[in-house]
Image: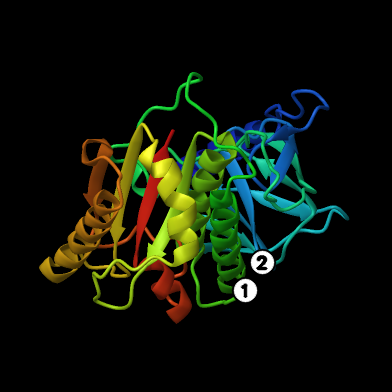
């Protein structure tokens, strides 16, 4: 019994010491942008909050830390659920605080306008480091300050922003569906962030051409052809990526993904794009840019991505 009492006493001392440990608070009163949706006052290292429709979702780079508490701007505790590796708060929060990990941080929603066709500034983003969530990584050319810029009045911009608006709208719709896990939505959001980041730099044009189910016939519409061909013929590099809507990389899907890439390449070469500047890659599953549980999303995942680097 004496040993048991001693163990309990030691545990009590340790807990008391932890409760008295200093909490890291602000690194100054200047807010720091920590994601495309939130800025923070305090040490927010490794914490990435995002908005998904009616919810705020949070990812920690260190995994799933214990003893985390969230409170709204009235100081009321915010409930959350764990979905995959993400904390899904019970509602969307314009302002909230987080305590735990020996620190306290205040997060505030960034009140920004949607990207418009006139946007020219570089977006400051926190992008995931894992290569599997970056759809345009294979054969991608390094961006340098010496590269040419695409003019914002180029017709290709209207096409790119129209496609991005469609993808963002579908993502927001899915985020309000309780059957979706935060993990897939978070990864899709990161992919769209990366595309918007590249577009904002004006060094490249990134467009998607979609395919019917199990189809490899490349048939872009006239508007896309007219906007894409002039800059593709004058590009430093053109990267083509073939994708399917499948979560299984079987032989059939590999054949479809590769067939879409080859069809797109043949089309570009036939229309005057130098073959030696074209690089191709295909993936039979995953790498979605739209929610895979919605039919409209699956249609948008059946695609080739054409990345024109100037």
Q: Is residue 125 visible?
A: yes
Q: Is residue 84 visible?
A: no
- Check disc 2 and report the residue beneath it: 53
Q: Is 30 left or right of 4, judged from the image as shown?
A: right
Residue 159 position within the rendered picture, expressed as x and y whole percent measured from the top left: 55, 57
Identified at 30% across, 44% down, the residue is 273
Callout 2: helix, strand or loop?
loop
Quadrant where the image shows the C terminus: top left
Q: How many marks?
A: 2
Vertical relation: 293 (above or below) 65: below
Q: Nearer the viewer, residue 276 or 39?
A: 276
Vertical relation: 184 (above or below) 173: above
Q: Nearer the viewer, residue 267 or 82?
A: 267
Vertical relation: 263 (above or below) 147: below
User: Which of the 4 image quadrants contains residue 160?
Assistant: bottom right
Instruction: Please identify the residue farthest to the left as the structure is shown.
Output: 251
User: Which of the 4 image quadrants contains residue 53?
Assistant: bottom right
- Check disc 1 and report the residue beneath it: 176
Identified at 25% across, 74% down, the residue is 215
Q: Are marks 2 and 1 in contact (CB under 8 Å)?
A: yes
Instruction: Please identify the residue farthest to the top as the structure is shown.
Output: 146
Name the disc covering residue 200, or none.
none
């Amino acid at each position: 019994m004496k040993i048991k009492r001693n163990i309990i006493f030691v545990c009590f001392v340790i807990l008391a010491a932890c409760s008295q440990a200093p909490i890291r608070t602000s690194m100054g009163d200047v807010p720091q942008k920590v994601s495309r949706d939130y800025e923070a006052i305090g040490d927010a290292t490794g914490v990435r909050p995002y908005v998904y429709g009616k919810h705020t979702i949070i990812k920690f780079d260190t995994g799933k830390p214990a003893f985390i508490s969230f409170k709204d701007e009235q100081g009321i505790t915010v409930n959350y659920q764990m979905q995959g590796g993400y904390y899904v708060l019970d509602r969307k929060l314009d302002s909230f605080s987080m305590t735990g990990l020996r620190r306290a941080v205040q997060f505030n929603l960034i009140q920004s306008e949607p990207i418009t066709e006139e946007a020219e500034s570089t977006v400051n983003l926190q992008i995931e480091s894992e290569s599997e969530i970056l759809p345009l990584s294979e054969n991608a050319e390094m961006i340098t300050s010496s590269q040419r810029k695409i003019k914002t009045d180029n017709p290709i911009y209207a096409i790119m922003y129209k496609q991005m608006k469609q993808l963002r709208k579908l993502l927001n719709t899915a985020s309000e569906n309780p059957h979706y896990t935060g993990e897939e939505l978070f990864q899709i959001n990161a992919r769209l962030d990366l595309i918007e980041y590249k577009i904002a730099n004006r060094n490249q044009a990134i467009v998607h051409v979609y395919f019917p189910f199990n189809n490899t016939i490349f048939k872009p519409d006239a508007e896309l052809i007219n906007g894409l061909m002039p800059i593709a013929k004058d590009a430093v590099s053109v990267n083509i990526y073939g994708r399917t809507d499948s979560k299984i990389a079987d032989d059939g899907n590999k054949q479809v993904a590769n067939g879409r890439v080859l069809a797109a390449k043949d089309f570009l070469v036939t229309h005057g794009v130098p073959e030696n500047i074209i690089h191709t890659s295909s993936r039979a599953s995953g790498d979605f840019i739209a929610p895979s549980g919605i039919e409209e999303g699956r249609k948008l995942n059946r695609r080739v991505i054409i990345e024109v680097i100037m």
